[in-house]
Amino acid sequence: MKRLSSSEIKKIVIGITLSDAYIDGKGRLDFYSRYEGYAKHIYDVLSQVSGVKATFKVKHDKRGYTGYRVWTRQHEYLKKIHKYCYHGRKELNRYNISRIDSVSLSHIWMCDGYLEHAKNRKKGTVQNIGWLCLEAYPKEELELLQQHLLSEFGIGSTLTPKPWGFKYRVRIGGENLQKLISVVYPHILPDFSHKTPLFYQNDTRVDWSLPNAEQYITKYTCIEVIVRHPTKVGRT
């Protein structure tokens, strides 16, 4: 892994902290992923922070699942990140949201993003829907995130009610989803390639001017293949 600047490291750490990682008040970080490559990547990033002692371990769940855990000893650097992101519980606030750039957003997408390819029975087309599964944050904090996504990246979104957590999930669709994928695509790791392909029947709703559009947009003829096996559809 290449040597990262302190700024690059901070962007990644903030991204994972606002999603899947946990940092306690003493500055100890704990991160778990189902993806070995991603967990090793986070281990390598943390190991580049001077004085941080990171540990990587394979974790076997009693239910038969295998995951990968990365944790650190306490460190002042991580204690400062904790201060930015916690106030009793983990929170989204104006300070840490203002630090979300394309790199941070890509890690939030890899950790908590979900790309759905739903069948629109009425139109006989595929509907691409992006979800940020951030129900751990209350509505007013998600609204701050929505404002940032719109002002910083031009990405519009809505909040959809859910029966768990603080009851809301961020939904992104249409041209806004294309913008989101365009922003995060350069930073997506191989483990998460399934979180980038968008499918369209024709060019009517496709913005080919977006960076990397030809890499993540595929035109299709058979809707059933996409809905059942989206990652197996070849590009045309």
Image (tube, grey):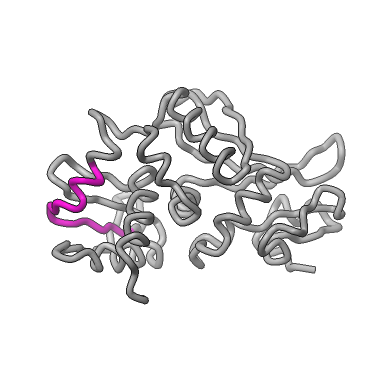
User: Could you say which quadrant of the image residue 157 lies in?
Assistant: top right
Q: Which residues are magenta?
A: 68-82
Q: Is the residue 37 above or below the residue 70 in the image?
A: below
User: Could you say which quadrant of the image residue 202 lies in?
Assistant: bottom right
Locate residue 132 relative to residue 20 in the image: left or right. right
Identify the image quadrant of the N terminus: bottom left
Q: Is the residue 140 above or below the residue 114 in the image?
A: above
Whole-percent x, y for residue 73 in the image: 13, 55
Locate residue 172 relative to residue 218 in the image: left or right. left
Seen from the viewer's position, the closer of residues 112 and 88 is 88
Locate residue 51 relative to residue 46 in the image: left or right. left
Q: Is residue 173 visible?
A: yes
Which residue: 35% across, 58% down? 66
Whole-percent x, y for residue 49 in the image: 22, 64
Locate residue 207 relative to residue 17 in the image: left or right. right
User: Could you say which quadrant of the image residue 135 lies in?
Assistant: top left
Seen from the viewer's position, the closer of residues 169 and 211 is 211
Which residue: 45% across, 26% down? 164
Which residue: 61% across, 53% down? 181
Whole-percent x, y for residue 10 in the image: 32, 55
Whole-percent x, y for residue 235 in the image: 75, 68
Identify the image quadrant of the C terminus: bottom right
